[in-house]
Image: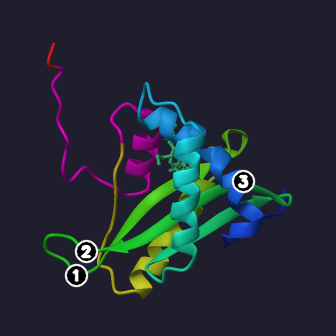
């Protein structure tokens, strides 16, 4: 199955990448429903990212079909001037477990390194066990934890 990772092309890839967000956001934020307004806002962010040197997106293409995404940005932390931040990573369900997610993160991390970032960070939801297992497996560890308490 010929697979390649290439730069995101706003015109060609926008629709497919928006479709990925249903699973990503509904899985990470239980109860949240992706709707038109959310997708319009997401599309605006993608358009802005395309013109921004501190943001890079790549897509996974398998058999000519866009089947994955990684969105990488450079941010500033409390103690570091520049840190890599993974904003979004996705692999189509039928292609999971074949190393594509790892490949996408590696490309983002190589770019972070080339930009002088000493580390790569991301946010994950505790309810998304699949993603947590994936992140742990590729070397990420919990550094800060957001805690919550229902106020019944
Ligand atoms: C998270 C996600 C990107 C992983 O992609 P993937 O292509 O399946 O991951 P890989 O095949 O590259 O896996 C890399 C490693 O993580 C492990 N891993 C991946 N998914 C796993 C799972 N569900 N449970 C346990 N380990 C898992 C793999 O076994 C592999 O380890 P190995 O190389 O030592 O064998 C994919 O499941 C996905 O798109 N999920 C929906 C979107 C999402 O939740 N994104 C993250 C939040 S923004």
User: Separation of disc 2 and disc 3 at Cα?
Assistant: 30 Å
Asked if marks 2 and 1 touch (Cβ < 8 Å), the reply is yes
Which residue position holds label 1?
81
149, above or below 100, in the image: above
Q: Is 62 on the left-hand or right-hand side of 80?
A: right
50, above or below 37, in the image: below
For the residue pair 146 and 99, the one nearer the viewer reads as 146
**Tag 3 or tag 2, which sits nearer the N-term?**
3
Which residue position holds label 3?
15
On the image, the x and y values in percent for residue 15 come to: 72, 53
For the residue pair 141 and 55, the one nearer the viewer reads as 55
15, above or below 109, in the image: above
Which residue position holds label 2?
76
Residue occupying the point 37% across, 66% down = 85
Say whether mark 1 is within 8 Å of ligand 1. no
For the residue pair 144 and 73, the one nearer the viewer reads as 73
């Amino acid at each position: 199955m010929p697979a390649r990772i290439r730069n995101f092309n706003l015109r060609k890839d926008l629709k497919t990448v928006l479709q990925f967000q249903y699973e990503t956001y509904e899985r990470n934020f239980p109860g949240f429903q992706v709707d038109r307004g959310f997708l319009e806002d997401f599309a605006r962010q993608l358009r802005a990212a395309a013109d921004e040197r501190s943001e890079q997106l790549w897509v996974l293409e398998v058999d000519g079909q866009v089947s994955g995404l990684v969105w990488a940005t450079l941010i500033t932390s409390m103690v570091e001037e520049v840190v890599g931040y993974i904003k979004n990573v996705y692999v189509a369900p039928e292609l999971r477990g074949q190393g594509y997610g790892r490949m996408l993160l590696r490309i983002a991390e190589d770019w972070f390194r080339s930009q002088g970032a000493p580390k790569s960070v991301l946010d994950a939801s505790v309810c998304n066990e699949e993603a947590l297992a994936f992140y742990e497996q590729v070397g990420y560890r919990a550094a800060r934890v957001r805690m919550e308490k229902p106020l019944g």
